[in-house]
Amino acid sequence: MDKANKFANVIPNKDQWQHFFKNEPHYLLMDIIGSFFYAAGVMIFVYNADFAPGGVTGISLILNHFFPNLTVGILSILINIPIIFVALRFLGGMYLIRTFQTILINAFFLDVILPIFPTYPITGPVDNLFAAVFGGAIYGFGLGIIYQTGTCTGGSDLVIMSIRKVKPHFSVGEITILIDGLIILAGVFVYKSLNALMYGILFTASYTVVIDKFMSGAISGKVALIISDQSQRIWEEIKLNLERGGTFLKAEGAFSGADKKVLLVACNKKQVPTIRKIVGRIDPKALTIFLDYTEARGEGFIPHYEDFTS
């Protein structure tokens, strides 16, 4: 029974297949757009540079350095196949199907589409520096688009997620630093330059910042906590002017012991000045606190998505 439960999520069920085919046009479009930028960061900026980034991309570039007849895309597929088989035990079958689709599209852009475009000329250390920064940013933008669909590009992502399933006390950061660090360090010996370490770290830092901004910045906003005796009127004005809903929270004044109603309103950053004006006009004595949120899902916000790894 335990063994059966362990592999129960390997074969997608009927609901997962229905969800997949229903959303496949959207998945495919996002994979194509994301893969273009992903491959552009690699083939235009990094391919001719003297460093290796982390992950399977870095391993593929290092192997391509020694075996130029094997393309980066083909190497990426070959490396990912055994990783997928190992990850199959820990991650959902549907998630891996989606991921393999992304890997194939990535490989197509790496080997067929992007080689058509001119590469960034590398003539010295400064060019390597710019390649690391701009290549990492474009690469990260592509990954951000792909991650939004609930999939990944395989490689170290699958390794990290699999390790986390077995060793949940390990942080993502610790595992990422270990895996990517070893690959970037290998680039030092391949390209025979200590600068390769700096460029690889800079590339990783650049794409990490872009992914973080892309994943949280586009769906982040503000939460207003308004404590007022006129909270009902304030909410009605917010609803009228901003078409925002709200939630009343029951509270008690620490000094007075009186019952209070706290109005909670999630909004975007552009709506903060309007809420300030509404509160100030109706109840100048109200206490208003604005907090940042990185993500809000549900009715009135962006929709929930299915976790393919469960």
Image: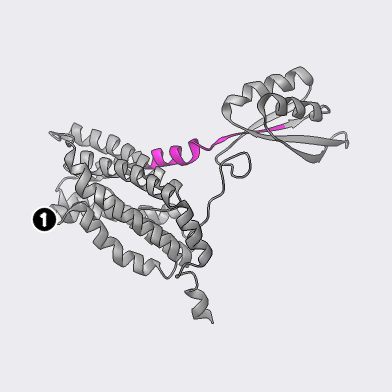
Q: Residue at x 26, y 38 (%)?
A: 132
Q: Which residue is drawn at 29% across and 50% down?
A: 106
Q: Residue at x 31, y 55 (%)?
A: 103
Residue 297 horizontal side relative to residue 157, left or right: right
In reply to whether residue 21 is colored magenta, the answer given is no
User: Is 57 drawn above or below residue 237 in the view shown?
Assistant: below
Image spot of residue 105 (x, y percent):
30, 51
Q: Is residue 171 visible?
A: no
Residue 149 horizontal side relative to residue 85, left or right: right
Q: Is residue 241 visible?
A: yes
* Label 1 neighbour load within 10 Å: few <14, some 14-19, many 20+: few
Count of labels in the image = 1
Q: Which residue lies furthest to the top in this view?
A: 281
Residue 265 horizontal side relative to residue 193, left or right: right
Image spot of residue 3 (x, y percent):
49, 80
Q: As rendered, which of 19 and 216 lies closer to the eye?
A: 19
What's the magenta region? 208-225
User: Is 105 drawn above or below residue 278 in the view shown?
Assistant: below
Image spot of residue 79 (x, y percent):
26, 61
- The amino acid type of the residue labelled 1 equals Asn
Q: Quadrant of residue 96 in the image?
A: bottom left
Q: As rendered, which of 78 and 109 lies closer to the eye?
A: 109
